[in-house]
Amino acid sequence: MTPRWRTVAQASGLAAPDGTTRPTIFAEMTALAHATGAANLGQGFPDADGPAWIREAAVDAIRGGANQYPPGRGIPELRAAIAAHQLRHYGIELDPDREVLVTAGATEALAAAVTALAGPGDEVVTLEPFYDAHAAVIALAGATHVTVPLRPSSGGFRVDTVALAARVNERTRLILVNSPHNPTGTVLSDAELDAIAAAARRVGAIVITDEVYEHLVFGARPHRPIATLPGMAERTVTISSAGKTFSLTGWKIGWATGPAELIEALTAVKQFLTYSGGAPFQPAIARALTEGDPDIAELRNSLAARRDLLIAGLRAAGFSLVEPDGTYFVCADASPFFTAEVRDGAEFARALPALAGVACIPLSAFCHPGSDTAGALASWVRFTFVKDEATLLAAIERLAQLTPRPTH
Ligand SMILES: *Cc1c(COP(=O)(O)O)cnc(C)c1O
């Protein structure tokens, strides 16, 4: 069918050439998992809801009348709680009235930030592989997406800092960072954060940092916001959300913090995206951020145990992998299982539900088609461990039935 008009979505590649919605690989793999009864280690959402007391707080808020438009910037209690959280955890001082914006999840904060601050002719630099929504909002802004590879090594997926220095130039308006990183589970090292900060300062770029997994780090090294590096507070917009931290991904309460003039620029766009939202969830998340540190610690510990379980299971099945320091995800090289029909990670991910009753996501889904990184990671797939232990154990038992190719 020839479309009668060409939409921005088509022009930017978000829609198919005929104008239809491109199903994401996540939706495709979840549908396949449902159809085949596979353990869904593809899409990263928790199968257990967040703490009951936080959910009760939202119910109380509905009963108490928090049902009309909240203020566009977010209710004062939540903005104060976000500012207090940044101070308590990271020593970042914020004015809750001018330097904090509540959004419809981190997704809206990202969309508002990128469309407010970049446009045609501007370059936006991200790591590759990248979270799919990052590429989408750069495309919607009409900006050019430039990437810097993350490469697998025994020390984790590491930033190619030579490529970083070369690709950040005077056209770079934004560097969009994500640490802890989806899909690789990498927590950027101090040296990597320093290199990104130095590149941003060198060309006067703004840093947008997606820190939705800030509390889900498992190693000795805690999460370090790039805004805390020298000279960075004045040029960084920090984005996070309650979804991952409190296992409440459907609530879509997120936030952006940073210098007043940048938050003002985001607010100008955000007010015409959703204006405001999540009225009963905002007071509940204000309480969660204030009183929920024990719940965060419990989630982190339980996720670390599930991470270890899945890592051991994947290794026992014959995968080689890179151990993640954070997030919900572990990435593994599926090449030991390749055959005449299953020749790369995408074919493996499509075949795995039938082969072994498990769903995963190919890393190529997080790369530009045909890029060097897509080529380098063509055999890699991502599994999530944010599932209950029974699901993980069932998946591990099934994966153990796979037969790796004999090695010589
Ligand atoms: C889940 C996720 C988001 C989306 O956060 P919401 O608060 O649900 O909008 C953003 N960035 C990354 C890296 C994610 O994994």
Image (cartoon, helix red, strand yellow):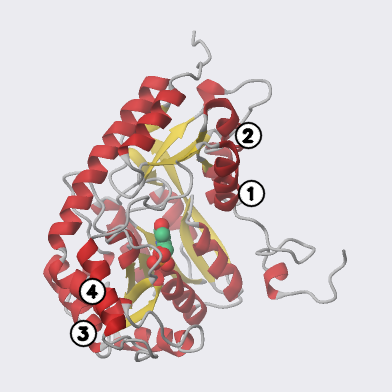
Q: Is residue 6 left or right of residue 187?
A: right
Q: Is residue 47 left or right of residue 346?
A: left
- Indicate which label's residue lies in the foreground, 1 or 3: 3
The residue tagged 4 is 57
Name the residue: 33% across, 68% down: 241
| Upstream in sequence: badge 2 or badge 4 | 4
Three-letter code for the amino acid on which mark 4 is drawn: Ala
- Indicate which label's residue lies in the foreground, 2 or 4: 4
The residue tagged 3 is 77
Quarter holding residue 137: bottom right
Quick one: SS at disc 2? helix
Query: Looking at the image, is 228 positioned above or below residue 186?
Result: below
Quick one: SS at disc 4? helix
Residue 104 coordinates in the image, percent (x, y): 42, 76
Q: Marks 2 and 1, how far apart in space?
A: 15 Å
Name the residue: 35% across, 73% down: 253
| Upstream in sequence: badge 4 or badge 1 | 4
The residue tagged 1 is 369
Three-letter code for the amino acid on which mark 1 is drawn: Pro
Three-letter code for the amino acid on which mark 3 is drawn: Glu
Q: Residues within 10 Å of mark 2 (few under 14, many from 20)?
A: some
